[in-house]
Image: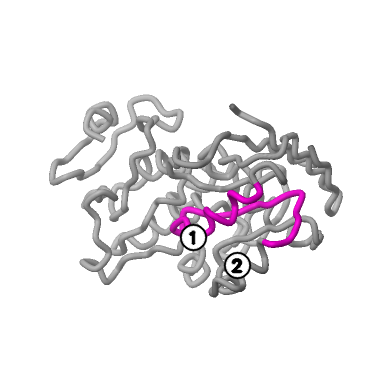
Amino acid sequence: MLNLLCNGMMIRINLDNGIYQVDPVSASGKSYLYSMLQELDREDILSLSYKDMKLLASKEAKNELFSRDYKLILIDRYDLYNGVLNEYLQRYNEKAIVIIDLKQKSEDWIDHMCEFNLNKDELEVSELW
Amino acid sequence: MSLELISSRTFNKENYDNYIFDIDKEFAATLIVGTQQVRSIMKDIDGADFVDSREFIDRFGKHLYIDRLSTGCKAAILVALKPDMVIDTRECGLNARDTIVCNCKEGHIVFYDMGTTIKTCGRENTSIDVVYRGKEYDSIDDLNEVI
């Protein structure tokens, strides 16, 4: 569970540690959450989108980024990554809340689904199953 | 003209020089025109109202830059505005996928099996104009039987 406040918007992450795939619905607030987490710029929160992939071009860069401790990891637009972060994200399975925006099915390694509920002043993320 | 659904199982990008993979990047390079179709897509997927090529009003009444639309909505708008391009819909949620099929009567998309049938986007008797595996479909029910 994690509550964050960003520009008057309350973000409630009502999830236990684990890896969650977001319910495949457009306009639920995933990219919005990504932009807010970028704005918060906290060391214990990692948010990545496809445009950030240039930061992760080398294996060394990936190892360095995914050697740190995080409370929350959000991977936006993961359908475009071709699974290149799978082994790194698995490391955080029981250590952090990992939320992955992945529209296509991936039954291989994601255990849970979550959903976003976006209101005017609050974004809530909760477990679907 | 019809909307061509190209199955992701058989699609080979090497065969297309007009293929769009990165929706955000292409959207940023596109002049967004507020046609009736674009306005309808924005309303259906994001609950948004078009203002001009740079701005929209979101479902909570906030004025936002057009690049803040959802990726699924951007993909659908690209299908509408660039019917000569092949748009990859892997980033589209179910609602965006269904809106494309219901709204767009021409264009080309790479289509993914998401494990659920296409819905009518809240409209009764929605007619579609789709070509899938060489066959034309004007009914969602008929298309759902083969996807």
Q: Quadrant of residue B78?
A: bottom left
The image quarter containing residue B122 is top left
> Residue A48, position in %: x, y?
63, 60
Q: Compared with residue A58, is residue B43 higher up or lower down, i.e. above or below?
A: above
Q: Position of residue B43 (x, y in %)?
A: 54, 43
Q: Amino acid at mark 2?
A: Lys
**Element on which disc 2 rests:** helix
**Residue in the image at 81% along x and 60% along y:** A42
| Residue B50: x %, y % from top left | 58, 53
Foreground pick, A106 / B62: A106
Asked if labels 1 and 2 touch by Cβ distance under 8 angstroms, the answer is: yes
> How many marks can you see?
2
B74 versus B94 height, above or below? below
Q: Quadrant of residue A41?
A: bottom right
The reply to whether label 2 and label 1 mark residues of one chain is yes
Q: Is residue B131 above or below residue A42?
A: above
Image point (79%, 43%), residue name? A11
Question: Within 10 Å of the Cα at label 2, are there few (<14), some (14-19), or many (20+) other Cα atoms?
Answer: some
Q: Which residue is mark 2?
A: A62
In the shown orientation, is residue B144 left or right of residue B94? left
N-terminal of the two: label 2 or label 1?
2
Asked whether residue A76 is drawn in magenta, I would say yes
- Magenta region: A67-92
Q: Name which residue type carries label 1.
A: Val
Is B99 on the left or on the right of A31, as rendered?
A: left
> On the image, numbered disc 1 is attached to which residue?
A84
